[in-house]
Each structure stands twice: as structure tokens, then as C-alpha cells.
Amino acid sequence: MTRITLDSIRSCLEGVIPSSIATCSEDGTPNVALLSQVHYVDQGHVALTFQFFNKTRENILANPRAMVQVVDPVSAAHYRLSLEYLRTETSGPLFEHMKARLSSIAAHTGMSKVFRLLGADVYRVHGIEGVSYHGNLSCLPPQYNRLAALRAVSRKLAQCHDPGKFLDELLAALQQDFQFQHVMVLMYDARGDRLFTIASCGYSATGIGSEIPMGAGIIGIAARERIPIRIMYMSGECSYSRAMRDSFNRDDKVLEFETEIPFPGMATPHSQLVVPIVLDQHLLGVLYVESVEELRFTHEDEDALVSLSHLLALEFRTHHLDLEPTPEPAPVSDIRTSISGQAIVIRHYAENDSIFLDDDYLIKGVAGAILWKVLNEFEKQGRIVFSNRELRLDPTIGLPDIADNLEARLILLQKRLAERCNSLSLEKAGRGRFRLSVQRPLVLEEMAQS
């Protein structure tokens, strides 16, 4: 008989049908209880939720052996897992992942005030046994072939070399090949310890430039802990609430104007999947998908997007480490002769590098510092062509030393200008270079520190 592996029964660990755990006290008295969550750690380990100081907990500490029964939600097949308790984790990636998932289960069952994770109990799996049952022995085939979808997306992305077009192609491929209708890509801003939206699809507004603080909601938690998080029910505690963003924005001292770009996400997603984009232990960003359907994203979806995230990390590294040619002297243009119309008043607040166009908020942070530098160079010297290299070498911009995501910030700035101002634009001007286009007179105002 073929040995049953933990990988082969991962669908049983979705929590659709509650699992049960049997333990024995030191004198051999048995006890059976329901479990909120059986979490797949790796091929030889699972983690169980530790929520209450109950009989199960007392038994495990006295006798570390347990038997857990899990059920396949499609075939109704039952399996028994022989486990040995190893340790309890009360912080870190595993704990945060299980805490986020428990929050969604609690919200789904109306038990948010009761379900509170105290720890993640890690167990070694010594054996898995199939249990006889009445029902269909054969599982239904998966709804989507994720390996074929991943192959198709990888092929399309491998043929795209422009960073901006790469993101557009990524979103289109995820919609077409994975059938994910609501997708976002957020990049990490180490300077502000936040994530900013650089690309999205499936929403009425793009939300380009909208921000999520590190550690806020499942997006911020997945980014902070560098772990994928998959939620199958509408989550209460771990949703990205406006209250979190409001409290975060109070840290900014420029409060005279509204500087929050509305986040494009669903108000009540029932399924969510967040996958961090990491390169050499450095966070670059996250890939996020959501749906109005419950149980929308599977283990296979998670595995496929984790694999895709590695491709994205390599793509971002390619553009970051791309050897730019030695910059030629940037041309000085007589572009001012073709500028006409009413002047644009552009205000810069140095406290957080916020940029306002005629009192309308545009951007802040590193992207704001880049635009302010470019506009000043244009006003003083007539320059219209700039290189990525000179931006990286300019200490006034404040790029982090590692994983600066410069190209992502330029894409963000380009998209925000396209959405908010038809008289200013940034265009690619060759390898590692971009061009400023100005159609109306500029009035640059440096605002005094408060």
C-alpha cells in the first residue's frame, strides 16, 4: 500500500471540516476535543492552535503523544495523524500566520471574542493512517491546473524586459491564466517602513501610491514576517482597516492637507492570499490577491504564487543590478519655448517629501524627493534627461542602501503623474535613463518646516 504523506492530504488541513485531537493524561485517561486549526509546517511537522489552558493542554504537557483526525472536504476521507509534541511558539512567522488564519475562522463563526491564539504547538508527525468511511473514495480533480498556469505566466514574463510593462503583463497574466480577478503588487519602502501600491487590477480605482504600514493587516504581517498568508473566510482583526491607516498617517507632521490615497482593496474580502517578494532575506514587496468567494485560494495557489514571487524577485534584481552605461552629459533643452498656459504651482514639504500640485496631493517619500530634484534641475539648468545612477548616488533623495526599489519608485511616480497631471510626465529614455516632459510653466515653492 502506498504510504500516505502529509503533502498528499494538505486539503484536509484547510479547516473546512473541524479536526479533533485525542490525548491521554498521565494515568491513561483519554480526552477528545475539537481543534480550530491544523497547520502544515513541512513534510514531517504540523502545528496546532493553543488557545485555552484546558485538559488537552494539561495532557500534552504530561504526555506528549496525541492522535489527530482530519477530514478531506471533497471526498470525506478521514485520516489519523500520530503526533509527538515538540514545542510552543508564541511569536515569529509561524505564530503570526496561524494568528491571522484563526482570526478569519473566528470572524466566520462569530467567535472573535473567544478565539485568541496563545501559541502555536509544533508536533512531529510519526505516521498517517487512512480510516474507513462511507463516501466517494476518489477526490475531484482540482479546478485549475496551477502548474500549467505558472508555466504560461513565466513564459510571458520572461519575454518582457521593461519594468513598467512587466508589471502590466504580470497582472494581465494572473487574470487570464490564474483567473485571479483582484490583484495588487505593493513594494516595500524601508525609509518609511511601509508598503506602497505600484500596480493593481480589478478595482474601480487603481490606488497607485496608497500605503499599508508594516505589520498592519495580513498584508503588513506577511511582509513583516516574510511569510505567505492565506485566509479562506472574511477576516475581522487582520483586515486592512482605515483606522490603522489613519493612526499611521498621524505620524506625519504635514496635516494641513489630505495625503492619504484610498486603498483599492475590497471592503469585505472572503478569501485573501498574500505572498512576500524576498531576495537574499531582503523584502522587496508583496503580491496580493483577494476574492468575494470563500475558500477561493488553495494550497496549490499558494505554492504557485510563492514560486512566482521568486521570479519577480529575480526580475527586480535584474533591473537593480543592470549595469547602466556611463552617463553621457545630460542635454540641456530649450523646452521652455514650447511651454504655455497657466502655471502649475508645485509645493514641496521637506518633512516627508510630500509634493502637491495646485493644492492637490500627488506623492511623498522617496518618489517625492526624486520629483523635486528633477523639477529643480529642470528649472535651474533646463535638464530633461536623467539617469538612474545619478539618483542612486544622490544622498539628498534618501534611498536605502539595500533593496532601494528605485525602478519601482520611478514607475509609481510615472503612474501618479499620468493619473493626476496631464502637463507633467516621465518617459523612458533608454537603458537606465528617463526624460521629463513639461507642457505648462512651473512655480516651485519650498514650504517652511512646521
Image (tube, helix red, strand yellow):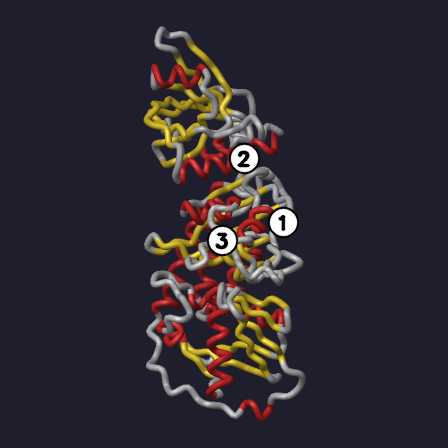
Between the residue at mark 3 and the residue at mark 1, the CA separation in whole angstroms equals 15 Å
Whether residue 282 is visible, yes or no, is: yes
Mark 3 or 1: the one toward you:
1
Amino acid, disc 1: Met
Crowdedness of circle 1 by 10 Å Cα count: few (<14), some, many (20+)? some
**In the displayed structure image, the side of residue 416 where residue 122 appears, left or right:** left
The image shows residue 145 at horizontal and vertical percentages of 51, 48
Labels 2 & 3 near each other (Cβ < 8 A)? no
Residue at the image position 42 percent from the left and 70 percent from the top: 397
Q: Which quadrant is home to the N terminus?
A: top left
Amino acid, disc 3: Leu
- In this view, 297 is above or below 66: below
Whether residue 411 is visible, yes or no, is: no
Residue at the image position 49 percent from the left and 31 percent from the top: 12
Q: Secondary structure at mark 2?
A: helix
Is tag 2's residue or tag 1's residue first in the polypeptide sequence?
Answer: 2
Question: Which residue is denoted by mark 2 in the rendering?
Answer: 103
Labels 3 & 1 near each other (Cβ < 8 A)? no
Question: Which residue is denoted by mark 1 in the rendering?
Answer: 266
Crowdedness of circle 3 by 10 Å Cα count: few (<14), some, many (20+)? many
Crowdedness of circle 2 by 10 Å Cα count: few (<14), some, many (20+)? many
Residue at the image position 56 percent from the left and 49 percent from the top: 247
Q: Secondary structure at mark 3?
A: strand
Between the residue at mark 2 and the residue at mark 3, the CA separation in whole angstroms equals 21 Å
Is tag 3's residue or tag 1's residue first in the polypeptide sequence?
Answer: 1
Question: Which residue is denoted by mark 3 in the rendering?
Answer: 287
